[in-house]
Image (cartoon, rainbow, N blue to C red):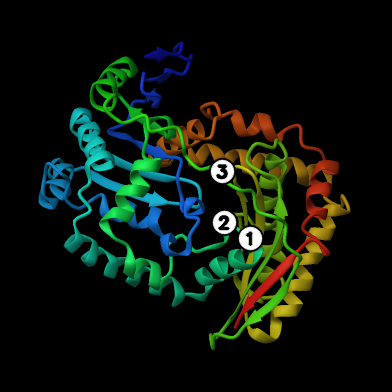
Amino acid sequence: MDRAQMNPDDTLQATLTNGLKVIARRAMTAAEYCGVFINAGSRDETEPRLFGTAHFIEHTIFKSTLNHPSSYVINRMEEIGGELNAYTTKEETAVYSIFPEGHLDRAVSLITELITSAAFRADELDNEREVVLDEASSYRDNPSEAVYDDFDELFFKGNPMAHNILGTTRSIRNFTTQNCIDFRDRFYIAPNMVFFYMGPAIPDKVLEIVNREMSQIKTGDGNVPPRVAPSIVAPFDKIIKTGSHQAHNLIGAPVCSRDSDQKYAFSLLANILAGPGMNSLLNVALREKNGLVYTVEASPSFYSDCGQMTIYYGCDKKDSDRCRDLVYGEIERVAGKKLSADDLSRFKRQLAGQARVGLDNHEQEALTLGRRLLHGFAPTSPGDIQRHIDPITADELAACASQLLPPFTSRLRME
């Protein structure tokens, strides 16, 4: 076991002999947080018949295991006041637990069992596939959610990044026990995982428990398939008729990957344009001044080999083009370096403050801890975001904004 030096903020990093990376941060919290991140998501499903496998497994590992019935799984953490949770993205799967202090052994043992010994029994798969199909239908019933999936199908066309994380009705209906086992055995291996912990336990004690329970996780055969970077498709402007009351618009453009330092400038730009603050440029222009929208939001997404930034707004159908022009007008304002130095400083301070508030959410802080290690980044501290955004200049922000203007942008409208 390779144990890294303890960081000043009481954060320990280590690697078990099987290749599992471990990060544990001591924090005086009332609850403990721990789990695993697996470097596998929907983009690792390269055949249409397998679309949705990563998400389906995330659901079905909570059924029976080779050693225990489903009743054991669903009660093991809940009966002490804890909870189990999981989620899947295009590039990762998280399985984690939140529980009262003093039950770390129980949580680590259970999570290990779930990710290594889920039974994937046929009758349980049949029950859960109906749940997943209902989940997929609920997204399709909500155009403000569906527009993101439809946009990705066009934006990443020809690449596994394009398909819906949940899969298709056909693929979900045809998943078998062997499909699930094959995917798990290929991706749920120690070198492809990170264990994370945050709570009051001494990090060395956490490492001792993890080493005892998780050193059994297989190392695999080293043949995790490489990912293929998506090509940049030609910009599009498309309307999908859905019969909805509103027009749901998504404007997007390719941006940098997760490894680029430019991601901080794009994150700042997204916050300036349509972040959560009511003072964002687009909220003021579209909602406060003109009453055209209820919601407008900018979302940068940085992946291992690509990135995208989208701007969503929902409005009356007759106002779609007017809103689009206002959106581009505010982007041009930043691209033309028409933000004052005081405004730029204020927006930097706002983003840094939001980051500090976010770190006060212990669940999100714990997840961020594990996610960053999975992707090869150092642990965060409250001052990190400030250190990264302070040097950003108006010129850098303008260059990023220019990438969100025609001819680089695409738009999808569902109405």
Identify the residue under disc 2. 161
Element marked by disc 2: helix
Question: Is tag 1's residue or tag 2's residue first in the polypeptide sequence?
Answer: 1
Residue 183 at x, y percent in the picture: 37, 48
In the picture, which quadrant includes the C terminus? bottom right
Q: Nearer the viewer, residue 18 or 276?
A: 18
Q: Amino acid at mark 2?
A: Met
Camera sees residue 102: no
In the picture, which quadrant includes the N terminus? top left
Question: Is tag 1's residue or tag 3's residue first in the polypeptide sequence?
Answer: 1
> Does residue 69 lie above or below 127 as drawn?
above
Contact check, label 1 and label 2, Cβ < 8 Å: yes
Question: Is tag 3's residue or tag 2's residue first in the polypeptide sequence?
Answer: 2
Q: How many marks?
A: 3
Q: Is residue 381 left or right of residue 218?
A: right
Contact check, label 1 and label 3, Cβ < 8 Å: no
Identify the residue under disc 1. 156
Q: Nearer the viewer, residue 288 or 168?
A: 168
Label 1 vs label 3, nearer the camera: 1
Camera sees residue 108: yes
Seen as rendered, the residue at the extreme top is 5
Q: Nearer the viewer, residue 373 or 1?
A: 1
Q: Quadrant of residue 293?
A: bottom right
Identify the residue under disc 3. 354
Within-10-Å neighbours for mark 2: few <14, some 14–19, many 20+: many
Query: How many angstroms separate mark 3 from mark 2 (CA)?
Result: 29 Å
Q: Amino acid at mark 3?
A: Gln
| Residue 97 numbered mark, or none | none
Residue 184 at x, y percent in the picture: 34, 45
Label 3 vs label 2, nearer the camera: 2
